[in-house]
Amino acid sequence: METESDKRLDRLFAAARAGLTESSALEDHFETRLMARIRERRSVQQPWYALAWRMLPAYAGIVAIIVVCSITFYPARSADMFAALTGSQEDTVVISYLAGE
Amino acid sequence: MITLTTTDHEPTDENLVIAALAGDDGAFSRLVGRHKRRVFRMAGRFARDSDEQEDICQEVFIKVYEKLASFRRDAPLENWISRIAVRCCYDALRSRKHEKNHTPLDDVAYELHDHAADARNSAIEMRDLLNRALARLKPDERLVITLQELEEYSVREIAASTGWSEANVKVRAHRAREVLKRIVEEINGN
């Protein structure tokens, strides 16, 4: 149900809708001012450190590739001494063991 | 580079966008000329003075310029510009929330004198009353009530402009209206 304060508010809205501030003087030569500002922004070179953060995904990618390569090609040394000594020599170790050497 | 020379027909917004993207500043300037009225009108609803109105409009069109490449041409350009304008107005409201309680005492005295002296029901007085009440709303409340009641946007349009869901817009609009009613009564009571 619409109360008296609702009606009052609607009257205020109607008055505001009807009376919009005239801005045509402000709109004059707006394009010129805007384009001047855009040209000014274009001409200002951004310093390297302002662009550095944009390279963040590239940095992250490089780090990921390094981590993957290091894990793939240089696996972590085993903490077990026998395994460390016999690393990549399993065949020789088995033959020596079977031959009783 | 595509340039727009004098032709028999007015170029469409789409043609101007293509030319502007190709580096034709004149084309972008024409686009601004076509759409500035709507943006000025919207900014005028939220700005405190003409300087702020100009600042908001410049901000809107700088964003339009910078994001023009991301404009999908499946919808009218004016809708896209309106969405950017709504966001810039919202940003302007949020950036001033820390300063809203710092009205100089001179201004308060002037306002009190002004309202006591003037006729109560004049349209200027009503607009002034509404502006003072709107200034006391939170940024999201002011945005939603202004778009709905003054700019006469539908709930769907507000949702599209703000990124809020339609249900959220309805809730915010209802809440904003209740708060505004209370503020208006409070101002009238003083």
Image (cartoon, coloured by chain):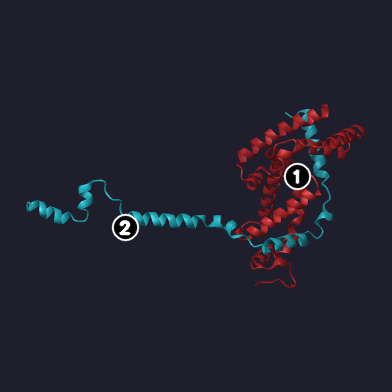
Chain colours: A cyan, B red
Q: Is residue B120 visible?
A: no
From mark 2 to mark 1, how far is it between C-alphas? 62 Å
- Residue at left 77%, top 48%? B52
Q: Residue furthest left?
A: A100
Q: Position of residue B116 (x, y in %)?
A: 90, 31
- Residue at left 72%, top 31%? B179
User: Do residues under tags 2 and 1 come within 8 Å of each other at their CB atoms?
Assistant: no
Give the residue type that dot 2 points to: Phe
Reading the image, the residue beneath label 2 is: A73
Residue B65 appears in which quarter of the rendering? bottom right
Give the residue type that dot 1 points to: Phe
Chain of the residue under label 1: B
- A53 w.r.t. B140: above or below: below
Q: Secondary structure at mark 2?
A: helix
Mark 2 surroundings within 10 Å by alpha-carbon count, few (fewer than 14), some (14 through 19), many (20 or more): few
Q: Position of residue A46 (x, y in %)?
A: 63, 60
Q: Position of residue A65 (x, y in %)?
A: 40, 57
- Residue at left 65%, top 37%? B170
Q: Is residue B131 visible?
A: yes
